[in-house]
Amino acid sequence: MSSKIVAANFKTNHTRRSTAEYVASLDRFMAENGIGTPVYIFPPATALENFETESGIRIGAQNAYPTVKGSFTGEIGLQQLGEFGIDTVLIGHSERRHILGESQEFIAKKFAWFKEQGFTIFYCIGEPLEVREAGEEAVRRYLVEQCEGIDTSYENLIMAYEPVWAIGTGKTATPELIEKTHSIVKAFSERPLLYGGSVKPSNIAEILAVPGCDGALIGTASWDISSMQSMLEIVNSE
Ligand code: 13P
C-alpha cells in the first residue's frame, strides 16, 4: 500500500452540496478499492463539515485567521473550524501570498499560532518564474526566505513545494527539477514534502516516483472526481 500523501486543494471551486457529494463518493470509491493512502481535501470554507468517512479522508481549511474568534471581517478562526472538527490548515499558498498579499511576517504569525493549537499544517513554498530563470541559487534563497519564522521541524508539518509557474498552467516541473529542488528543501526540513503544480492523471506516477517526493498537492485535476479517482488508483498501484 502506498504511503504517499495525496491532497486536493479545491481553491474557489465546489459548493457545500457538491463537496458533500464528492467526499461521499470518494469515500465509497476508496473503501471499495482498498485505497489506504492518506487523502486530504481542502474545500472552500463554506463547505467545511465534520464528514464521517470509512476511508479516513481528512478535511482541512484552505485558510484561517490566527484567532479563536474576534473582529476580522471575512475571516474564520478556531471557533468556526472547531465546529466541524477541523484541525488541518493550509498556510503560505502562493495565491494567498501573491494575489491576497500575505506577507512572510503574517504567514509566520499564522503558522506559529496554528502550531500552538497542534494543527496539522500544510506549508506551501515555491518560486515565481523570474526567480527560477535567475538560477538554482536564487531559487534556494527564495525558498529559504519563504521559511523565515517557520518551524520547519514542527512534528505536524507537511511541506509542499509548488513552483508558481507550474500552478494552473498545465506546465509541470520535470522530475529532475523536482528532485533537485526537493533536495534543497530537504536540506532545511526533514518533514514530508509534497510537490504541487499541474499534477494530473498522466503525470502523477512519474512525479511520485521522484526520490524525495512524499506526495502531491493537487488543484485543477482534483476538482473532477473521476480524475481524482484515476490518480488515487495510480498511486495505490505503485
Ligand atoms: P494546479 O494543480 O491547478 O496546478 O494547482 C496546484 C495548487 O496550487 C495546489 O495547491
Image: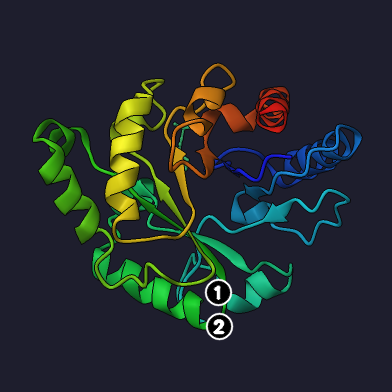
Q: Quadrant of the C terminus?
A: top right
Residue 229 lies, in percent from the top left, at 73, 28
| Whether the residue under disc 2 has CB within 8 Å of ligand 1 | no
| Whether the residue under disc 1 has CB within 8 Å of ligand 1 | no
Tell me the amino acid under the disc marked 2: Val
Report the residue that reaches farthest toward the front. Answer: 211
The residue beneath circle 1 is 77
Q: Are marks 2 and 1 in contact (CB under 8 Å)?
A: yes
Q: In screen coordinates, is 50 left or right of 156?
A: right
Tell me the amino acid under the disc marked 1: Gly
Report the residue that reaches farthest toward the left. Answer: 134
Q: Quadrant of the N terminus?
A: top right
Report the residue that reaches farthest toward the top. Answer: 202
Numbered label attached to residue 68: 2
Can residue 70 be seen at all in this image of the molecule? no
Name which residue lies at 50% across and 23% down. 206
How packed mark 2 is, by other alpha carbons closer than 10 Å (few <14, some 14-19, many 20 or more), is few
Q: In screen coordinates, is 40 left or right of 214?
A: right
Which element type, helix, strand or loop, lies under badge 1? loop
Q: Nearer the viewer, residue 53 or 71?
A: 53
Q: Quadrant of residue 182?
A: top left
Name which residue lies at 47% across and 71% down. 65
Which element type, helix, strand or loop, lies under badge 2? loop
Name above or below for residue 35 compared with residue 73. above
Q: In screen coordinates, is 223 left or right of 142?
A: right
